[in-house]
Amino acid sequence: MDIFEKCRRFTRAKEVIEAGIYPYFRPLSGNDGPRVYMESREIIMIGSNNYLGLTHDPRVIEAAIQATKQYGTSCSGSRFLNGTLDLHHQLEAKIAKFMNREAALIFSTGYMANLGGIATLVGKDEYLILDKSDHASIYAGTQATNGAIIKRFRHNDIESLEKILSQLEYDVPKLIVSDGVFSMEGDIVRLAEMIPLARKYNAQIYIDEAHGVGVLGEHGRGACEYLGLEDKVEIVMSTFSKSLASIGGFVAGPQYVIDYIKHHARPLIFSAAPTPAATATVLKTIEIIETEPEHMQRLHQISDKMRYEFKRLGFDIGDSKDTPIIPLYIRDDELTFLFWKRLFE
């Protein structure tokens, strides 16, 4: 046996491909937002994270083009050394103001923002308390910590959270990390009940707003704004790859916390900086979100109609509410693949 034995034994993907029901890694040959081109066919895209349809906005594309002309295609270095542009500082200031926070720090991907933020903040023998349905990047952050103690509570279950908190030493630092909008279920964190528990048991709160920014709240700041509890949450993060039509991510919060992450987060220090085009794209999409609320309004009109029609047709959509994430629970892998194939055909 050698290190590749597990690879040789892995046959499930091949079996599904041979059965003609493999839905993954299908290449697109064109994309105009609501419609994409796959295998020489035009099909409707309802699985994209392009929530506001800004990836093809001419103003956004032009911002990316002009940034590329001015700065080139790459920063050719990490933020820590020679890769920071004035454009990055402009975006961090823009995000901090938009998110109503003291400071923000941008990363090359949303995954790395969580990896860097969480692994940097929670140290050896400190507690990291997670919702079981948190995004994989949050769990990657736990694996990168230097000896943090990991606790998990049942999805959006406040009683389960309190049971865990009540068993922990009061004086040991604790960070509760939760999605604001859960990426698979489409439900929203029970923040109003979480905050009093955090205060009672000496914990801070970190909310992943990847699916909330540009979607929820009067100004599009996410679940914390939507719930009216922004000032009770210490740290928020989000990605650029959804409503903001780019790639990258950020962590935002108190200035002293962001300064600490900036000088200790290995995914920031040892990764190439966000490209000029990606950075300029986010500057422009935030500007559009701030000045054109009709994009969010349209998103919710479409989401509400789809939710209503799916339920009318008898589909189980779980607890999805007020978000564009609408799961259809088939609850059988093979049947799900077959369902996908019928839709594709």
Image: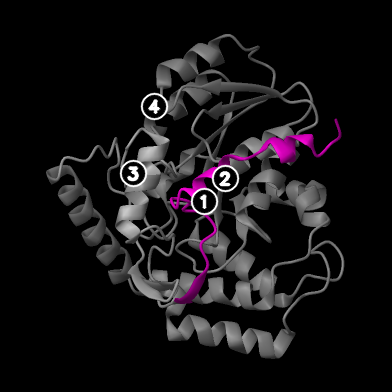
Mark 1 vs 3: CB contact within 8 A = no
Q: Secondary structure at mark 1?
A: helix
Which residue corresponds to the image point at 49% horizontal and 62% vertical from the top-left? 98
Distance from disc 3 to disc 2, alpha carbons, whole Å, reads: 23 Å
- Give the left or right position of residue 269, taking residue 138 as reference: right
Q: Which residues are magenta?
A: 1-30
Mark 2 vs 1: CB contact within 8 A = yes
For this orientation, the residue located farthest to the front is 18
The residue labelled by disc 1 is: 17
The residue labelled by disc 3 is: 327
Name the image quarter holding residue 49. Answer: bottom left
- Give the left or right position of residue 111, taking residue 25 as reference: right
Foreground mark, 1 or 3?
1
**Which of pointers 1 and 3 lies earlier in the amino acid sequence?**
1
Q: Disc 1 residue type?
A: Ile
Sort mark 2 into few (<14), some (14-19) or many (20+) by Cα contacts within 10 Å.
few
The residue labelled by disc 2 is: 13
Q: Is residue 284 above or below residue 136?
A: below
**Which of pointers 4 and 2 lies earlier in the amino acid sequence?**
2
Name the image quarter holding residue 247. Answer: bottom right
Sort mark 1 into few (<14), some (14-19) or many (20+) by Cα contacts within 10 Å.
few
Query: At which x and y percent is residue 61?
Result: 51, 83
Q: Secondary structure at mark 3?
A: loop
Mark 4 vs 3: CB contact within 8 A = no
Q: Disc 2 residue type?
A: Ala
The residue labelled by disc 4 is: 193
Q: Secondary structure at mark 4?
A: helix
For this orientation, the residue located farthest to the top is 167
Q: Is residue 35 above or below residue 258?
A: below
